Amino acid sequence: MTVVTRFAPSPTGYLHVGGARTALYSWLVAKAAGGKFILRIEDTDRERSTQPAIDAILEGMEWLGLTWDEGPYYQTKRFERYEHYIQQLLNEGKAYKCYCSPERLETMREEQMARGEKPRYDGHCRDNPHVSGDRYVIRFRNPQTGTVAFNDHIRGPIEFANSELDDLIIARSDGTPTYNFCVVIDDWEMNITHVVRGEDHINNTPRQINILKALGAPVPEYAHVSMILGDDGKKLSKRHGAVSVMQYRDDGYLPEAVLNYLVRLGWSHGDQEIFSVDEMIRFFKLDDVNKAASAFNTEKLNWLNQHYMKSLPVAEVAKHLQWHFTDQGIDVSQGPALEQLIPIMAERVKTLKEMAQQSRYFYEEYDDFDADAAKKHLRLVAQEPLALVQRNLAALTEWTPASIQAAIQRSADELGVGMGKVGMPLRVAVTGTGNSPSLDVTLALLSQEQVVRRIERALSYIMERAQEQ
Ligand code: GLU
C-alpha cells in the first residue's frame, strides 16, 4: 500500500507555524514511506478564503521546501464530486432531507440548553415521511447506537458513542456541501492513508469515519497534533512575536533552521537537537510525537539559525542572505563576495537580517560615524595613530589579513602603545562603527584604496571636531 498524506489548509490567512509543523509531520510520514504528499486547499468557505492567503500558503510551503507530489487541489473545483456522493447517500437512504425551519431548530436548541443538555438535532425529519417543503438541508443519517473508535497515532485509542453525535448537515439549503463532507470525499478519492492534522479536528473525526463507512470507503489512520503555546503557556499568537512562516524569513531565519525547530517542537529522537532533512525523514515517527502541547522558544530557534548559518554550504546561505541585502536596499555587486562575508559574520549575529544590516559598510560608504563610537574613539589623541596606520597600510604591497595585521602591530609598536589604541580608531574609521569582526579580515575584504580613503575621512572628521571645540 502506498502511503499518501496531505496538508489541507483553509486559506483564511498566512501559513502559521502550527500549520507548518503539521504540514512538516505529514510530509515526513510520506517521505519516510516513499509515499506521496498532497496539498489540498480547503476553500469552500468563500467568505473567508482569499487568493492572497492561498499565495501565502504556497509561498510558505515552497520556502520551507515542503514540496507536494500532487495538487494543489481546490475544493471549490470539486463540487460535482461532492454532489455526486450526496445524491448517492440520498438514494441509499443514508442521508435525508431535513425541512426543519431555522426557528424550529432555534427553539429546540434553547429548550435543550435550558434542560442542561448538549444541543443536538432531534431527528425530527429522519424517519418522518410526512415532512416536506421547498427549503431543506441534507443530513447524514448517523448510526444511533454503538461507538466509533480509532487509534490515534499521537493520542492513543479514542472512542465516541454514536449517541453523542447527531445527524450532521452535509449539504446546506443552497445545495453546497459542508466542510466535514468535503474532507471525507477528498480523503477517500485522494487515497489518503494517514490524516495528520491539528487536534482541533478530533471531534470531527468520528463523524467523518461514520460517513466513510456509509460510503463503503476505507478509514485512514489519524494523528492529531497538539497546539503550540507561547513561552508564557498561552496559545501562540501574534503577541508572542512572529507566527507566520514568512515572517521568519523576513526576520532572517533560514528555512533549515525553521524546519529543524519545528520538527523538534513536540517530537524528539534521543537527545539529538540538530536534524538534517534526511535525518528527519529517517528518524521521524508519528507515534513518537508528544501529546502535550509544546511551548515556543525563540532562543532555541536563534541557536539553530546560527548553527545553520555556520554549517550549511556557504553558497546556500548566500542565496538567502542576498534576499536580505536586496530587501534592505543594499547593492552588493561592488564589494566582497557573500561567500567570503558569511564565514566572518556568522559567528557574530543570530539572523541573516542582522548580518545584512551589520555588513552594510562592506558595500556602501556610510554617511556618518556611529555617534557613540566616534565620540569615544575619533578624538584628537587618535590622530597620530590613525595617520601612522594609514601610512603603514598604504605602503603594503600585499593586501592580506596577515600583512594587514602586521601593519597594525607595527604602528602600535612604533608609537609604544597597545594594539587597542590603534585598532579601535581604525575600526571606527573603516566601518563607521565600534563593532566589527577582527580588523585583519574586515580590512582584507575591503580594498586597500577604500581603507586608506576611509581613514582620511576619519582624520578630517577629527580635525573638524577639534576646530568646533
Ligand atoms: N482545513 C482544515 C484546517 O485548516 C484542516 C482539515 C483537515 O486537515 O482535515 O484546519
Image: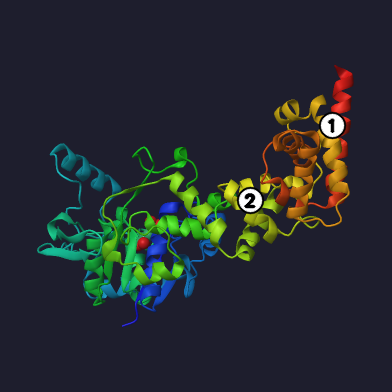
* Residue 280 location (% of width, % of height): 40, 67
**Badge 2 vs badge 1, beta-carbon distance below 8 Å:** no
* Residue 174 location (% of width, % of height): 39, 59
Residue beneath label 1, please? 384
432 or 56, which lies in front? 432
Q: Quadrant of ligand 1?
A: bottom left
Q: Is residue 401 left or right of residue 96?
A: right
Amino acid under disc 1 = Glu
* Residue 230 location (% of width, % of height): 39, 42
Callout 1: SS: helix
Look at the image and tell me whether residue 54 can be seen. Answer: no
* Residue 284 location (% of width, % of height): 34, 67
- Give the spatial CA distance, label 2 vs label 1: 30 Å
- Neighbours of disc 1 within 10 Å: few (<14), some (14-19), many (20+): some
| Location of the N terminus (image quadrant) | bottom left
In the picture, residue 416 is in which quadrant? top right
Question: Which-is-in-front pick, marks 2 and 1?
Answer: 1
Amino acid under disc 2 = Met
In this rendering, the answer to whether 78 lies above or below 465 is below
Q: Residue at x 31, y 74 (%)?
A: 193
Q: Residue at x 46, y 37 (%)?
A: 239
Residue beneath label 2, please? 345
User: Which of pointers 2 and 1 lies earlier in the amino acid sequence?
Assistant: 2
In this rendering, the answer to whether 439 lies above or below 159 is above
450 or 274, which lies in front? 450
| Location of the C terminus (image quadrant) | top right
Query: Which scheme is used to colour this image of the protein?
Result: rainbow
Callout 2: SS: helix
In this rendering, the answer to whether 214 lies above or below 16 is below
In the picture, residue 87 is in which quadrant? bottom left
Q: Is residue 75 left or right of residue 377?
A: left
Q: Is mark 1 within 8 Å of ligand 1?
A: no
